[in-house]
Every structure is written in structure tokens, then in C-alpha cells.
Image (cartoon, rainbow, N blue to C red):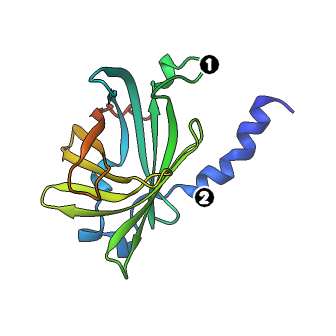
Amino acid sequence: MGGLDREARQEGFLEALRAGGPAEDRRGARDLYGPLIGSWEGEVVDHLEGGGELRQSAEFHFAWVLEGRAVQDLWIAPARSERSKVPGTGNRYGTTLRVYDPQLDAWRITWINPVTGAENHLVGRRFGSQIVQTGSDSAGRLVRWVFVEITETRFHWRGESSQDGGQTWICETEFFARRKPVRPAD
């Protein structure tokens, strides 16, 4: 079957996955990730051991899914327009599913990057103006992912790890994003 047939067969899945907004019980204080909904472009800076940096283009897409009870996103680096066929250092093409847990009064987060095999589980909460997500990576290290700043037009995200039970944190990765303009409907 041709490519068009494959695309048409996926439309039902994508239509059922995507939601027009948050479910009623996710609005207000529980709508932690709502300001991120949309598409973003920017740069990722990986802070390498020894003090070097790896800078790459990046793109991000956030949407309400599962009847508005979750936020799913895609983190892609380098951006699709610059991806090579052979995965290299810092290669990401992964997704995060963020689901609000009313008993915990926080968001349960699962990140999966099929390119590297990474799978992380975290819990996200608001602390002041920041969104702080804490948990562990697939190697068992403590991780903290922080949306340091979120505005209508940009966000700054830091990925940190700790080797000493959370006493000190090392910034391993930073993402700097700007909102992509919305194209007018035809």
C-alpha cells in the first residue's frame, strides 16, 4: 500500500489522541503545563564532562491528549530540518506524557527517548514561578528538570542530576525555546 494509505490509516488514532483543551478537572491550578501548549523552536546546550558544550537546534511540540487529561510533548534535537541519518551525541526524538494525579496533587511524568533507550519517571509541581520535576533516570541517578522561565513567547528548561542524594546538582542540559508563530488557516 502507498504512503497516502498509511497516513490515512493513522488519522483516526491522531484524532482520538488529541484533545482541544484540558478536561474540566484539569483547569485552573491543575493546568500546570497549559502555557506550553503549541510548537516551539530553539537550541539545546549539552554541558559535556570536561567543560565543553554541544549546541544543536531543537524543536518542541506540546498538546492536550487523552480527553484533555494529559499533556504529551515531543522534544527533537537536532530539529527535523537538520537531522542526520546516523544518531550522534545529544540526539533526541522522544516524548513525554504528563498526567495529573489528584491523590498526589502533582503530575506524573514519563519521558521516553527511543533513539537512546532512555526512560525517566518524575513528578512535577509548581514552585513559585518554576515547574520543578524530580525523579530518577534509567541509571538510577536523581534528576531534576526545571522550567526555569515560561512566558507567552519563550521558555528556558534545565536538566540537572545529582550524585549525592540531592545535596548538589549539576546542570547537564539546557533548552532555550521560542514559540513558533501560528500559521493562519487556509
Above/below status of 26 relative to 151: below
Q: Residue at x 66, y 53 (%)?
A: 13
Kind of element beneath mark 2: helix
Along the horizontal axis of the image, is 181 left or right of 156? right
Separation (CA) of disc 2 from disc 1: 31 Å
Question: As drawn, which residue projects farthest toward the right?
Answer: 1
For mark 2, what is the residue? 16
Which numbered disc covers residue 85?
1
Above/below status of 166 relative to 107: above
The crowd level at tag 2 (other Cα within 10 Å; few <14, some 14-19, many 20+) is few
Kind of element beneath mark 1: loop
Q: Residue at x 45, y 55 (%)?
A: 140
Q: Residue at x 34, y 21 (%)?
A: 55
Question: As drawn, which residue projects farthest toward the left?
Answer: 128
Along the horizontal axis of the image, is 53 left or right of 11? left
Toward which corner of the image does residue 4 lie, by quadrant? top right
Amino acid type of the residue that numbered disc 1 sits on in the rendered structure: Lys
Above/below status of 144 relative to 54: below
Q: Position of residue 106 (x, y in %)?
A: 33, 70
Query: Which is more foreground, mark 2 or mark 1?
Result: 1
